[in-house]
Image (tube, rainbow, N blue to C red):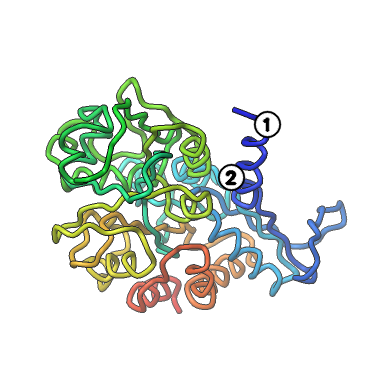
Amino acid sequence: MSMKLSLKILIRLGFILALPVFSGCDSNENVIETPTATDQRTELSVAGSTFASPFFNRVLEAWGQKNPNLKPVYRSIGSGAGIEEFIAGTTDIGTTDAPLNAAESARLKEDISEIIVTSGMISIAYHLDDIDDTIKLPREVYPDIFLGKITRWDDPRIAAANPGLKLPPKFIQVVARADSSGTTYAFTHHLSSISQSWKVGLGAAKTIDWPGSTMTAPGNEGVAQRLAITKYSIGYVEYGFAHRMGLKTAKLENQAGKYVLPSLDAGEEGLSGSALSSSSDLSESISDPEGDSSYPIVAYTWALLHQRYNDPDKDLAVRNLIKWSLTEGQTLAKPLMYLPLSQQIVQAGLNKLGG
């Protein structure tokens, strides 16, 4: 890979990998505040999801500017690591794109709150330089690509859905997550709902034993970067990362048999076609939305917080942050390609907070 290409990719990924979170300074100044020994602000640590890291970084930046007595920091370490840190008590708020499972819940010493704070789409992005038209992937095809059953771009099943396209006679390089990932859970939860082979094979989980030829990378940012530099590759990645990297994304066949590109409108249609949109149970993932215009792979991100924090200032800060994220903070979603929550989901979250 040339130095020029490496630099270009790093520049385009820059704000994702290292978006600064700061508070108490003018929003027009490009200044990163360095904590000092005399800094008396209340620290608030949030860690987990890479899927929603741009959203959380922007929320904490905006909220921190409104609350100069607080020092909020987001660490994009993956949902699995975020859950582990929250259980261990090394982060104040954990974030995850997979609801807690029974084993994780059993390790908690107290009741906690799981509150949905944002949502987005998982795109299937690919790197085919010589094809300008958008690839269509049927529901029976894309699970088999990630299972390693379809290994070439000119496979008859891909070609049948894309008449007129000259598909390259090349090996498909699948790219997947290397770490414990909520994005992986949401993606494989969807695949399990549409493919019996997937359900009884690899199943739905945050970590998957991928076929041996699969290339892996940590975080959504790592998958996006790997796709950008690997010809004939395909992978799953949060749509905003694909959009900012200029990656091509496939049209996926939805439950209604329509081929749909990821877009804000299609994602919102997918959320509205989910039973969870009007449910008070905020601990379920969306598997396969209904609706002609629905994009078929949408996901929620949860914030994990304690019922009470020992430090009263931190307790108040955590609750105010989540309330702000559910209300004013929702306006920050669309510019980053995330999906604003329905009023029902927002109200259910506020109810859990006691507001």
**Could you say which is closer to the camera, residue 13 or residue 76?**
13
Rendered position, 224 above or below 347: above
| Disc 1 residue crowd, few under 14, some 14–19, many 20+, Cα 10 Å | few
Asked whether, in this view, residue 91 is left or right of residue 116, the answer is right
Query: Percent position (x, y) of residue 86?
Result: 51, 47
Question: For the point 33% across and 40% down, which residue is it?
Answer: 103
**Could you say which is closer to the camera, residue 182 or residue 87?**
182
Query: What residue did someone put label 2 on?
Result: 90
SS assignment at label 2: loop
Query: What residue did someone put label 1 on?
Result: 3
Rendered position, 98 above or below 67: above
Query: Percent position (x, y) of residue 341?
Result: 39, 71
For the C terminus, which image quadrant? bottom left
* Three-letter residue code for mark 1: Met
SS assignment at label 1: helix
For the N terminus, which image quadrant? top right
**Could you say which is closer to the camera, residue 299 or residue 251?**
251
**Could you say which is closer to the camera, residue 86 or residue 33?**
33
Mark 2, mark 1: which one is toward the viewer? 1
Image quadrant assignment for residue 142: top left
Question: For the point 75% across and 69% down, which residue is it?
Answer: 69
